[in-house]
Image (spheres, helix red, strand yellow):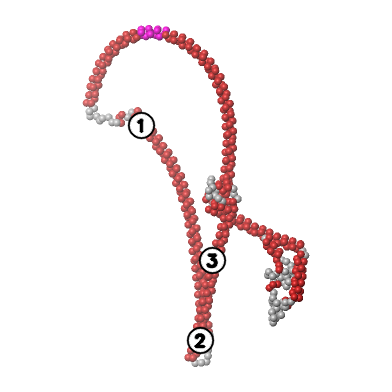
Amino acid sequence: MSDNINTQKSRRQYGAWDKPGVSLFAVVSQEPLNNMLSMMKPLPMGSSDYDKDAYPMIQKSSAAENAVYRAIKFQVEQLALKRRLEMSSMEEEQRINNELLRALVQERKAEVVAKSKLVQLQRNVPELRDLQVEVNVATTALKVRQQMLAEAQARSVDKQAEREEAQAQQQQVELQVLKEKLVADQKAHAYREALINQIAESTEKRERKQHETKVQERQELIDYQKEIALEQQQEAEKWAQKRKQLQESLNKTFAQKQATREAEEKANRTRPQRGILDSYGPTTAAFVAKDMKRRSDEMQARELNSVRLGLQLCKIQHDRDARDELLMDLLEHEYSVKESKRHMEQMLERHAECYANHEKVGKQREEDKYFREQRANIGNDIRRDSTSFGERQHHMYEHRIASMHKKNEQCYHDMEQQAMANEQRRNADAEAARNIAATWAQLQEAQDAAVGQERLRVLRIQPQEVLNAMRPYIFTANEQKVLNLETSKHI
């Protein structure tokens, strides 16, 4: 901007007249060329006095004319310098202020337009919206993590203080316990010595008493053994007699049972044998009840396990069905988008074909109308003369043939011109379509470049912690290279 103002200032200088460049003796800074005076030439011999490139003052080269020329040029330069120096400073300042104000207004308008374009990009481009959402999520996660780390550090400091306080209390308690233990050891040592003396005395008394008791008990044992031996001898005699009686009774009982069994076998020889169920009693019923209870518990456990496994399988199946439905929805959406795009292309093609057919039909109708009019004109142009019928017919035929030939030539010429015009129009339409496609591609590339620059700007203003907290797939390869995120660790 300053260079432009300086350039305009250097160009807007006043000379001897109000319009710069019209003076014959204008200074170099007012001339459109480097040195206009050197471009002038004397009037050639024999040429007109009104030649454009001639001036009467320098027609002939002489010392007097050269002196006058230099004097006038010096006076003109002095006058131009004086006017330039005496030019109003307020006007110059006002002009500079106007130029500065105009440049500032243009810059402000450019800034407003750039800001509005930036806001429009941020609102309309999904990539920038997703990037802003990811930045907000990463910032929130980073703040939450920092808060958690601060709380954990505060808890660790509190725990360390509590641990130190507990260690101090533990040391005091250990000292107190050590003192109490020392006093207790002293008391125990004194009590132990007294107890040892008392035990020694009681042991001596007990041993003496035990010796006396042993002697007395030994004598009593001898007497008791003698009595026991006598009683055992008498008891053995009694048991021998009883054994003999019992043996006799057992023999009688066995004989009676044998006889009874033989009689029952004879009586029950025709009756069926006892089955297994005849031995079913209370004991067997208890065992059967326990076995049935065990089987019932096992069945209930198996049912619970099957229900739990069924719930887990249902959950897994539900998750799988939900994922499959999501994939199917995405595939259906993609298919519908492709189908709608293909349908739109087919509609455009059919519309173009219909438009072309409509044009062809219109051209055919115009052509038919033209030929009908020509045929009507040919019939109207037949001349009427007073010659013979044959000559008149011959002239009519020749005139008709010539008219038809002329009309056909004109028709073919019009058709050729119309075909050329149609071809030019189609070429112009194709060129316009190509220009529109190229312009659209340029606009798309410019928008992609602007989106990339805006993404880089948004990412550059974020701290490194926020960039590390963001998910890696958000960044493109260029952004990872520019922001040096290739070897960074992401949380």
Q: Residue at x 48, y 12 (%)?
A: 199
Residue 385 is a magenta residue:
no
Residue 477 position within the rendered picture, expressed as x and y whole percent measured from the top left = 53, 53
Mark in front: 2 vs 1: 2
Q: CA distance from mark 2 to mark 1?
A: 133 Å
Q: Say what amino acid the circle numbered 1 marks.
A: Val
Q: Residue at x 59, y 40 (%)?
A: 150
Q: Secondary structure at mark 2?
A: helix
Compare marks 2 and 1 and give the one earlier in the sequence. 1
In the picture of the structure, the residue carrying the numbered disc 2 is 399
Camera-side residue of 321 and 453 = 453
In the picture of the structure, the residue carrying the numbered disc 1 is 288
Q: Does 205 sit above or below residue 335?
A: above
Where the N terminus falls, by quadrant? bottom right
Is 331 on the left-hand or right-hand side of 235?
A: right
Mark in front: 1 vs 3: 3
In the picture of the structure, the residue carrying the numbered disc 3 is 434
Q: Say what amino acid the circle numbered 2 marks.
A: His
Rendering quarter of residue 77: bottom right
Q: Residue at x 47, y 47 (%)?
A: 319
Q: Residue at x 49, y 13 (%)?
A: 196
Q: Say what amino acid the circle numbered 3 marks.
A: Arg
Q: Does 383 sit above or below residue 207?
A: below
Q: CA distance from mark 1 to mark 3?
A: 95 Å
Q: Secondary structure at mark 3?
A: helix
Q: Secondary structure at mark 1?
A: helix
Residue 376 visible? The answer is: no
Q: CA distance from mark 2 to mark 3?
A: 51 Å
Instruction: Provide the major secondary structure of the magenta segment.
Output: helix
Look at the image and give the residue range highlighted in magenta.
Answer: 212-224
Mark 3 nearby-residue class (10 Å; few <14, some 14–19, many ≥20): few
